[in-house]
Image: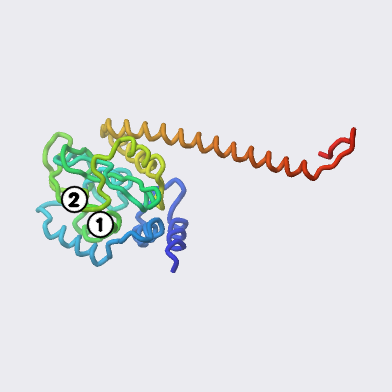
Amino acid sequence: MNLNIVANRIKKHFLAEDAPVLSRSLLLAGGVEAIYAKDSPDMPLVSETEQRRSLKEALAVKPVGDVWLFGYGSLIWNPAIRTVESKIAKIQGWHRSFCLSVTAGRGTPANPGLVLALDTGGDCIGTAYRIADENVKTELELLWRREMVCGSYIPRWVEVLDAEGNKFGYALAFTINPESPRYVKDMNVNAIIERLSTASGGLGTAADYLLRTRDGLRQWGIPDAELEWLSERVEITCDRHRAAARKQAASSRQTAVDREYRQLMKHVTSTPGEMLPI
């Protein structure tokens, strides 16, 4: 079946206009792969077999204790998996960064977008979600469909600290794969702003991803001055692009009206003193 038709049907069936596009229902239906294939037909995707193998390897080295998931980007505002507890958490040695270039989901090959990944150095405050023991396998399989379909992340178990700085366990965190061709390190900030302001794909715009993450952090009371500044710059740039587009559209419409008028005048004949028909 045509993948474009599949992607459109899935989006229409499962998604409300004001809901995050990446829903649990979409993941269960296998719709992410269809949307990615539509956005970027030549992009290789990780097979279900490889995803299961990767998950099995991750669980084989799971530290003793509960299974937690660390959210630093879209997982903050749209986890889409079943959890039994959530809290603010901090990890050390990693920081959130728009270092993952995407040609599907939040971008296309013609206009790549950017999404967040954990890059080495610093620390990161985000959210931790605990998964019930009986749900670990099913929920992580769903998570792998979301995060591991493009092979751009490396799942790791990282130590998580609570708001008081006390360790409460280990969480799965999706860190950037430095060997991935989609890894963009130290990109110029103006280039980041332009990508986030203009890129879009089957899962929405890159700007929407950024602003939802900012709003999610605010709702949790998690400060991130850099992301706040970036959001403001992107909003300004988006406004400027929209104003330019409106101006161009108005100019094009005026040109078309003038052209139609000139064509009309060519066919109008009148005698002196005779009024032209309206």
Outermost residue on the left side: it is 64
**Image mark for residue 151:** 1
Amino acid at circle 2 = Leu
The residue positioned farthest toward the bottom in the image shown:
1
Residue 141 coordinates in the image, percent (x, y) = 25, 60
The number of numbered discs placed on residues in the rendered structure image is: 2
Q: Residues within 10 Å of mark 1 (few under 14, many from 20)?
A: some
Mark 2 and mark 1 in contact? Answer it, CB < 8 Å: no
Which quadrant holds residue 221?
Answer: top left
Q: Which quadrant of the rendered structure holds the N terminus?
A: bottom left
Q: Which residue is mark 2?
A: 172
Q: Position of residue 38 (x, y in %)?
A: 41, 59
Question: Marks 2 and 1: which is nearer the front?
Answer: 1
The percent coordinates of residue 111 (x first, y second) are 39, 48
Instruction: Give the mark nearer the N terminus: 2 vs 1.
Output: 1
Residue drawn where x is 21% and y is 38% of the image? 125
Q: Amino acid at mark 1?
A: Gly
